[in-house]
Amino acid sequence: MAYEGELVKMENGRWRASSGCSIVNAGHQDADEYAILVAVELDERYQDVLDAAEKSLESYRERGIPVQIKLDPEGKGKISLSFEGAAPALAH
């Protein structure tokens, strides 16, 4: 199960994002609209940015700090980083 904007590294080492898509049964009396979630492989510039971000995030996770990264849903090439729960105290 995926959610809107979720980034996943596939088995082949490439990144994909989940994006919502509406489908309308146009031209029919019961013109129902359906929403589906589509997985899209990202282009090279995003692949490189996400590979670098993944390497950076590994250091947080190695210290026991759970983090999550998301691609900007407006498609402007930005990523957001969020810390899940309280971070443990770090040694100086």
Image: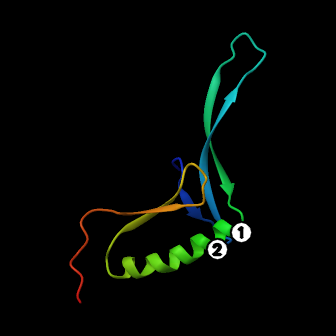
Mark 1 is surrounded, within 10 Å at the Cα level, by few (under 14), some (14 to 19) or many (20 or more) other residues, namely few
Spatial CA distance of label 2 from label 1 is 6 Å
Q: Secondary structure at mark 1?
A: helix
Q: Amino acid at mark 1?
A: Glu
Q: Quadrant of the C terminus?
A: bottom left
Instruction: Identify whether 22 is placed above or below 58.
Output: above
Q: Secondary structure at mark 2?
A: helix
Res. 14 visible in picture: no
Residue on which the image places disc 1: 44
Residue shown at 68%/71% (left/top)?
12
Res. 48 visible in picture: yes
Residue on which the image places disc 2: 48
x, y percentage for residue 78?
Answer: 55, 61
Q: Are marks 2 and 1 in contact (CB under 8 Å)?
A: yes
Front-most of residues 47 and 74: 74
Tell me which corner region of the image, top left, top right, bottom left or bottom right, holds residue 63: bottom left
x, y percentage for residue 51?
Answer: 59, 75
Instruction: Identify whether 73 is placed above or below 87.
Output: above
Residue shown at 52%/74% (left/top)?
53
Instruction: Identify whether 91 is placed above or below 71.
Output: below
Taking the image as shown, residue 79 lies to the left or right of residue 38, namely left
Tell me how the rendering is colored. Answer: rainbow
State the mark number for residue 53.
none
Mark 2 is surrounded, within 10 Å at the Cα level, by few (under 14), some (14 to 19) or many (20 or more) other residues, namely some
Residue shown at 35%/69% (left/top)?
66
